[in-house]
Image (cartoon, rainbow, N blue to C red):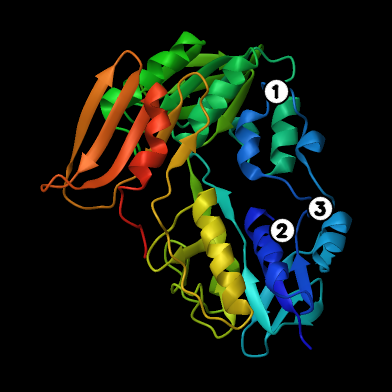
Amino acid sequence: MAPVVIIGSGLAGYTLARELRKLDADTPLVILSRDAASSYSKPMLSNALAAGKSAAQLAGASAEQMAAQLGAQILAGSEVEAVDVAKRTVRMGGASLGYSKLVLALGADPIKAPLQGDAAGEVMQVNDLGGYARFRAAIEGSKSVAVLGAGLIGCEFANDLAAAGHEVHVIDPASWPLGRLLPEAAAERLRLALAGIGVRWHLGTTARAVSRAASGLRVELADGSALSVGAVLSAIGLRPRTQLAQRAGLKTDRGIVTDRLLQTSAADVYALGDCAEVDGHTLPYVLPLMQAARALARTLTGTPTPVVYPAMPVVVKTPAMPVVVCSPPARPGAWQLQQDPSGIDARFEDEAGKLLGFALVGAVTARKQALTRMVPQVLG
């Protein structure tokens, strides 16, 4: 019997494998990974520095341990070169592996900042354990770090780096941090809190060039200013990995296009996690991934189950100023703010006063559960 094959051993791939084994202990399962296939939580990468955790400490079970837990064959260090949907095979290292069902859990790649300068290639990105290990080594003994991007990951790293004792410069073209998630007043509360622990903000501009200097690196900004730092971290966003799917002839757009069963344009080929565009939605967060993995496990074991996305608030890991966001859909409405010294309660409501999303900053994040119950499903 041909196995179920999962390409990817990140949070998506391993979560699906666990959910699958809850329902079916016997179907052959093969997991292909281009790295060491250690089990770890990717969201921990952006808040591990202050805790002094190494990449080895973040890694949980090894590939061998995961294989034993899941009753699966795990092929680490296996770069998949092609998928043949007609022959129902994947090719890697010159060998072919047949599948009964195939799941693409490929993840996403960091977007590279368009930079000039002789040190542009030294700008770092953290998207996996290896990237975290290299970044941690690079900032060892380095007092200052520039972070490109004031989005969710950039703000989390800024808080973590500052708490670990580094001087942090955050550069972003937006006028306030978390510009896609927070209204200005709520973002200002976060900006001030991070400034209070030493984060220096360079908003409304971008990094233009990174060059080597006697004391480390020189970052030139579009506004004409320059920074001297020891390391530069780019956190300007992620792009779903679609190249393998495109070569296989699968439909792609912002991600690998699937229906609500997570079925791609090819029979018995599915996509899950950061690489997937599910019924028009790309949701690169943990809670949507968990919902999708549970639904797909049921589908793969014979009970077709469309994924349902309830309201899923995102907790931003910025201890200096707690933030929870439940992004509203692209519908007409306006932010209604309540603010006091303890925090900001921002609610996005339509013209009829119906709650469509919210942003909570400070102590009012305790209202998360109550408000979540009031928000309609993202995909139901």
- Residue depicted at 53% across the width and 31% down the height: 317
Q: Are marks 2 and 1 in contact (CB under 8 Å)?
A: no
> Which residue is under mark 1?
51
* Mark 2 residue crowding within 10 angstroms, few (<14) / some (14–19) / many (20+): many
Does the image show residue 330?
A: yes
> Which residue is under mark 3?
36
- Residue depicted at 65% across the width and 81% down the height: 101
Label located before the other in sequence (3 or 1): 3
Look at the picture and state if 43 lies above or below 239: above
Label located before the other in sequence (2 or 3): 2
> Which residue is under mark 2?
9
Label located before the other in sequence (2 or 1): 2
**2 vs 3, front mark:** 2
Residue 14 x %, y %: 70, 59
- Residue depicted at 43% across the width and 15% down the height: 193
Q: Is residue 241 left or right of residue 56?
A: left
What is the distance, in whole Å, between disc 3 and disc 1 at their CAs? 24 Å
Q: Secondary structure at mark 3?
A: loop
Q: Secondary structure at mark 1?
A: loop
